[in-house]
Image: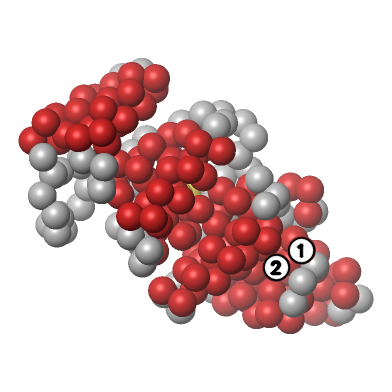
Amino acid sequence: MMISRLDLAVLLPLFCSAALFAGQESRVVQPRPMGTKAESRQVPAKAAAEFRKSQEAFNDGKIDKAVQYLRNGIALDPGNTDAYNDLGVIYFNINQPEKAIEAFSTMIEIDPDCFRAHVNLAYTLNAQQRYKEAERIARRGVELKKMDLKIRYMLGMSLSSQRKNLDEAADNLSMAAEEFPEARLELSRMLVEKGDFDRAMQELQRFTQERKLGEKPGVSSVQLFAK
């Protein structure tokens, strides 16, 4: 059994399209222990041992060894989406996005209905300005979980960045803003471009008010969603 499970979604204040998402700097995040939900598949004992060693190496800051142990475990248990997810998150945070994309894509190959993989892959593609691909992945994610606001954020960002389907982009960003106030910043920028200055100001005012009153917590530059 894997000893950590990570979910990645980066949510930043976005005033300009050139800074859609963070991810150019190296930033390794601490994995959270897995929850109490039982796994539906059996992990081979030797693979589980490699995954434990990976966690230990990660905790000690030995990232290269953590990656190697993860890959050892994957070789013994190639269908383990948790392991690929951890691998993808590490690669993203050490500024190797193409390898992160490969890991998240492999998760989808293993399990086409893996929602977490769609969120993480859509985010990483957005971060690399591969917006058309991000849109495709995000749309599939919406099919899997229509009301999830993380994937709505990813879809809204990919559309806004392409200057495509702006009404749909606005709808998705508005939905996401109910949980992630930073979505209002991208929405306001997009509204300014459309010439809707009144609504753009309203969105900025709502964002400022929510932050000032502390109605919604700020979102860190890297936020993990553990499942």
Asked whether 170 or 113 is in front, the reply is 113
Q: Is residue 197 visible?
A: no
Label 2 and label 1: CA atoms lie apart by 5 Å
Front residue (pair 147, 105): 105
Residue 107 appears in the rendering:
yes
Q: Residue at x 33, y 19 (%)?
A: 65
Which of the 4 image quarters holds residue 87? top left
x, y percentage for residue 199?
80, 79
- Residue that numbered label 2 is attached to: 159
Tell me where residue 129 appears, x and y as whole percent: 70, 50
Residue drawn at (51%, 53%) of the image: 121
Q: Which mark is residue 162?
A: 1
Looking at numbered disc 1 in the image, what kind of residue is underneath it? Gln
Quadrant for the C terminus in the image: bottom left
Q: Where does residue 188 sit, x and y in percent of width and height?
A: 77, 68
Q: Is residue 73 left or right of residue 111?
A: left
Q: Residue visible at 47% across and 59% down?
A: 119
Residue at 55% in and 32% down: 96
Q: Are marks 2 and 1 in contact (CB under 8 Å)?
A: yes
Position of 177 relative to 219 (above/below): below
| Residue 65 vertical placement versus 99 (above, below) | above
Neighbourhood count class around disc 1 (C-alpha, 10 Å): few under 14, some 14–19, many 20 upward: some
Give the class, few, some or many, for how many residues have Cα within 10 Å of label 2's Cα (few <14, many ≥20): many
Q: Residue furthest right?
A: 195
